[in-house]
Image: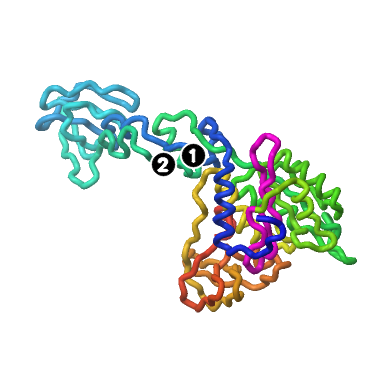
Amino acid sequence: MSADDTTPADWEQARALAYAAGRAAAGAAETISLPEADGRTLAEPLRALTDLPAFPTSSIDGWAVRGPQPWRPVGRVLAGGVAEPLTEDGTCVEIATGAMVPSGAAALVRIEDSTRDSAGLVSGEPRRHVVPDWRMPGEEAAKDEVLLPPGTAVDPAVIGVAATCGYESLMVYPRPRAGLLVFGDELLTAGTPGAGRVRDSLGPQVPGWLRRYGAVVDPSAIAGPVQDTLEAHLAAVRGALAGADLVCTTGGTMHGPVDHLHPTLAELGAEYVVNTVAVRPGFPMLLARVPGEDGRPRFLAGLPGNPQSAVIALITLVAPLLAGLQGRPAPALPTVEAASVVRGRGNDTHLALARLDPSGRVATPVGHVGSAMLRGLSNAHGFVVVRPGAEVAAGDLVPFLPLPLVAGERP
């Protein structure tokens, strides 16, 4: 796609193109220790290295018994020990939770359901219920069974499963490195807006969104405002791309007298993955592939200067790109119920800011949703997606594009 081709791409097509570009450019997998793997993505299947459990395991403190009662205790087995077989009827061993059940045992009797007579013999009744008092080998997984597929995001639970299996390290994809360049001589980086200048709100917030989508953003990779000249833009973009897999820019995506992003990309020999998207708000946005000196492509995402439009551009193009770069599945959209009417935007997809109810199933549009506004964004969980030529009525089931909120922030 060239800079001259300004036919807006369909929103869903644009997301698919961004994901495919990232997936094709994903870095080589690497092996890292379990504690380091949180937030990464599995590059190969996580398989059970042995049956889980690997041996019959007691779920209670009590007695492993054989034959009719009363039973004569002949030993004890604790967690971590190897149980000797029970070979004679009328015998038992004391057993702890997590310990190996000895072969030859017919049942387990809980300590609270047992008694001992003056001769030390044990009596009691095993509980008869659906869930047994011990776990059998392979009950959770069989050896070599695939527990989690490639592309699974690694979280503490995944790390726990891997540790249970006996892994000490995991093969994962690298986390993409991202940078941010803020364009615009009209921007202030401190103080209150006035005298024709506005406060930059994207420089402080975009890195947080990028991190939530899995990118690594070093503070040194954030720069701006970049002077509104072609020379300054070219130097800033070239420098940023040298240390990042992805560089986001804010503003300059039009073709006005001080919009130097397109000429900069042309100078760098970039290829457009997406050049404008038929979505409102969010126009215009772009994603370009820039050749790297090492043979691996780098990416530049041009976000509009209006704050809400910039965030929409980020979740439209950057989120699927980063998913692809990390080897994760393409982001899927859940379905929610619209609480009220949401108007369409003609031939464009309309992303309408909305807040979810406590169940997470009903979306209510929020106010203050202009392209230059952020108040609505701060009260929303994501966007109701209204397809071109459509209008949403109250009660309709609609796709929902969630913001990547952190647990506990805005439930």
| Residue kind at label 1, given as amino acid type | Leu
Residue 360 is tagged as: none
> On the rendered image, what quadrant is the N terminus found in?
bottom right
Residue highlighted by disc 2? 148
Mark 2 / mark 1, whichever is N-terminal: 1
Residue at the image point whose x is 64% and y is 61% from the top: 312
Task: Give, as a single range, the part of the protein colored magenta.
Answer: 273-302
Q: CA distance from mark 2 to mark 1?
A: 8 Å
Residue at the image point whose x is 70% and y is 36% from the top: 293
Q: Is 190 positioned to the left or the right of 327 in the image?
A: right
The picture places residue 195, in percent across and down from the top left corner, at 90, 66
| Residue kind at label 2, given as amino acid type | Leu
Q: Quadrant of residue 261?
A: bottom right
Residue 296 colored in magenta in the image: yes
The picture places residue 153, in percent across and down from the top left corner, at 50, 44
Residue highlighted by disc 1? 42
